[in-house]
Amino acid sequence: MELIYWLILIFWIVAVRIFKKKSGSTLKLAFALFIIAATLTVFGLRNLAEPVMRVSFIGWIIGLIQALIEYKKSV
Amino acid sequence: MKFFARPSVIISISALVLVISWFHEGFILGTAEAKIPFYNLDRFSQHTSSAWMDIYLGFASNQTLASGPTWWFLSQIQQLGVPGFLIQAMVFWLLFFSAGMGVYWLTEELFPDLSKKYLILAVFFYWFNPLSLVNVWNRFLYSYMVFWVLLPIALYVFTKGLKERKYIFGIIVSLLLTLFSYALTAYVFNVLLWFVLCFTLFFLLLINFNRKFILFCFKFFLLTLVSFVIFNIWWMLPLLSYVSASETAKELSYFISSAGNVYTLTILSQKLGNLIDIMRFSHAGFYANEGPKWASYYNFPVLIIVLFSATSAVLFGIYRLRKNMPALFLGTAFMLGIFLAEGNNPPFGKIFQFFFEKISILQMFRDPFEKFGFLISLAAAPLFAVGVKECSDSINARVKSLIYPTSLIIVLGVFGYPFFSGLVFTSQTPPNDNYAIGYKVKVPDYYKQADKWLQSQGSNFRFIGFPLGDEGITYDWEKGYQGVESAEILFSTPNVMFKTTIPYFDQVAGQLEQMLFTGTNFNSAADLLNVKYFMVRSDVNTSERRLRDPKSLEAIFIQKEKEGEVKKIAQFGKLTFWENLRWFDKTIYAATNRVEVSSQPSIPDSLFDGVLDNDVLLQADSRNAIKNKAVMTIIYPDDRKADNFNDDKRPLLEDQKKYRFNVTEQANYELVLDGVNLNKEATLVGQLKIIVDNQQIARKGEFRKDNKLSYGQIYLDSGTHEIVVNRLLSQNLILAPAEVILQSSQGKNTALFELADFDPYSRYLIVFDYLIRTGDDFVFMFQQNNDLFRNGNIVPEFPYLNILKRDAFNNFRHANGIFTPGRSEKAWLFFGVNPNADTDVIIKNIATNRLFEPQPVLIKENPRVQLVSPKISYSKKNPTEYRVHITGAENPFVLVFSELYNNGWEAILEDGTRASDHFLANAYANGWLIDKKGDFNLTIKFAPQKLLETGRLISVFSILAALIYIGSILKRKKNII
């Protein structure tokens, strides 16, 4: 089960590299996924909301690391 | 007016409003492991001021030493006549104020452009967010509260030091950690605190990676760490001595195992580690069904939206300020906190589990949500304020003005409501579920009277309080208390009133009540514990804690009074005291005769006929240095534990139980069966078949004076021997018709059968056959008179066989199980069908038999050699030091010191030599072999006390030096200005 999240992590990192996306795009997507997961939770769909929230969480991790790299490059 | 607009004044007044709302009625608050220290601060202070506490059977205070200065300071205030509730109110105000100022300064330091109103918002968010509510304030552990205060302040000073590159801040951090050392009584917070500081350091190094800064960081961190160790050495030294002791690991492994920790981690991660809960700061259990009733309202969709909106603000802050270093720092800390709080849950929980299993110290984080929740709260508070500001800045002017007030309403109104209303101090269980009571406690006056009376009786004895249950207790007082038993706060006299996971104490306390009800000579056991009084309390909630009925305990003591063993001596309100008429001071005594027990001795061994008052129970092996033979050798089988039956396993009548004995000396041994209840099982005795090494014992058993069953002397060679005892069951203990029919359509919904001749310390086999003719299921319960009630329903102690389902083939089904009652007086078999569903059930062949489980024991008695016992007199200097004077020692003897066994205790002779042979005596106490003749003195000392005192000196002088240094720097700075 956990493997799928590792695959998503790898896929997301590869996508960021290929499409040369900045941290802003990653964080925006992660934020959108968070809103979707939160909405699903409000409607009582916990089983559906949790995987979406996990993917969102992966997005926040990648986005923050990207932001850190960008910050480091800028100073 | 400007005065009231000052942040410190706003924070101070807000904290004051909270505290007034909680304490205006004049009651102290107490629950859980925090107990009720504010009832008697002086007593609590004494217990945390030395390395050994003379409470219970004695207890090393390694874990609580760091809280000593706090309790000492508070006790000084109480001695001025300030009531406990007012001191507690002041402490709570100080905690809120300090935490508030810490968060304010931290947020201001990280985001200097943020206006004051947003800084105040960060403070309120830190105070009231659901993680603080559940993990800190509802949890109600003082170490948690202090850590919650310490974390933002320490991080603020630490980051300021790194930012300004000034070493003095490292020393200030260490001084702060000393000031808030209470937080460090929970070892896990030492790890968490240094983890946060290390994370901060590494983050800044990552961002600012240059040689000069690396060198500064290294020195700064080293200075902080070293000064922290020196300032706090007073509690660290005794702790290190305890941790490094060879027996510590053995003792701890008795209660804690790595596999158990992983299991707990998994269970808690699954329950609390879901991201949809953590991402809205929610403790899933508390808001679902484990918290008070009001908590479930936070699962309403509107409130879920509100909770998520707070997280949205935090995330929005991270997103908007992703090019700002402090926001990145807090954002990373926030996500790291969430990752860790998840435990071993996906997506990346396996990483957590890997380190958890490999690094044993991390197993302190087996409840990761509770511990790492502090990090989430800390990072989220400034980010929330920043997020709200960014949200406000990015929205059009018309809506903009609403953002801040709305945020404030959410934080104060939705998050803060449980605080302002006092609901935060309520829980699911009585009496805390009553909102008018909650955690408020009013200890009845008769406790003070009883305590005073006990003190007037001397200071060289203990008492046992009944009913005696586990760690948790529920008192039915006007403002009742539920939590860990506070016996050491209610009474100055050491006592045994509960069973808890303290090595040796655990086994002793767990056996006492059963011995009182079933043993013939309970006073002998009480003597071993130096017990002068027995107390029966009838103000406890017996069903909440599944305790024996105080009336049945009273009846036992009335019976014992008739037999001349005890005497009713005092009554204070609902507390009755009975004097042990055999008592004499056994704090320190000399034993020339020993009773050897083949495995570890236990208190019930003192009940064997032939064991005298001044004998000592010792483990066989060991004390060969005592030249005379043991007066008695008791050999138990290799495996003393009772069979652990599964509920679906029926022991057959023809079953036999085999016991293996390891005999070291060939001799005649008396074969005795222990654990035979003379009143209830005398008729079964004739059916017993005992086979020793394949030869059946022809002789019939005879009851000895101690009510144990003797099969006479048997000659055994040294080596391993096998004794086989056949298993027997009592007759059917219930009177039930051949067939019981339950028909909901006829209104026959329940059937109840009481067990005759009930003994709560036996196990019962229950069997019946059933056929569900109509309907799907029915209920069976093993009911007891002290069963717990929740929402009007019984919560059975043994839920198995609870709901019985219909057979697909419509045949009779057989049900059976072994049931072990729990501290009750009566028990019933209950059968019931749902009155609202058409159900028709036939139950037949209902039977309940008590398992007859006597245990064979081999006893060898040797003639007593009349040795002269030396006379012992002693004086107690303090709980860690006793001066002993010995007169007329003619032979080697065992000096027994009736405090809980701990390898820190030392017996030091006048010439400074230590008695080297220190061992466990009487199943819980300390024993030394003293091989010296004549009259002499010795001192019994608890060695870690010396470490504590040395540590105190080092700490005090180093703190003074640090303060002088800081003062001189500040003065120099002032002069320059």
Image: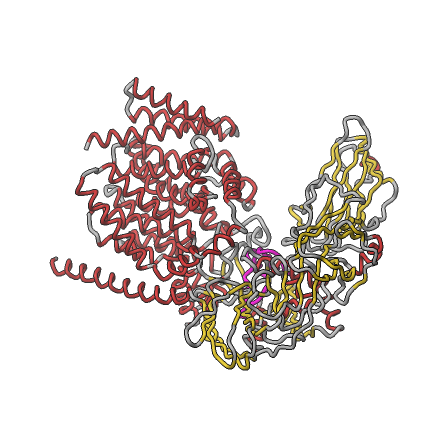
Quarter residue B607 falls in = bottom right
Q: Is any part of residue B538 visible from this angle?
A: yes
> Front-most of B313 and B379?
B379
Quadrant (top left/top right/bottom left/bottom right) for the N terminus of chain B? bottom left
- Residue B488 magenta-highlighted: yes
Q: In the drawing, does residue B271 fall left or right of residue B561?
A: left
Q: Residue at x 30, y 48 (%)?
A: B155
Q: Answer above or below: position of B213 versus B464.
A: above
Magenta highlight range: B467-496
Q: In the drawing, does residue B27 fall left or right of residue B753?
A: left
> Front-most of B334 and B8?
B334
Q: Position of residue B442 (x, y in %)?
A: 55, 63
Q: Answer above or below: position of B60 versus B895.
A: above
> Front-most of B529 and B300?
B529
Q: Residue at x 48, y 41 (%)?
A: B283
Q: Position of residue B697 (x, y in %)?
A: 81, 55
Instruction: Tell which residue pokes out farthest to the top in this image.
Output: A18
- Residue B45 magenta-highlighted: no
Q: Position of residue B396 (x, y in %)?
A: 30, 30
> Front-most of B192 and B325?
B192
Quarter residue B533 falls in = bottom right
Q: Position of residue B45 (x, y in %)?
A: 44, 66
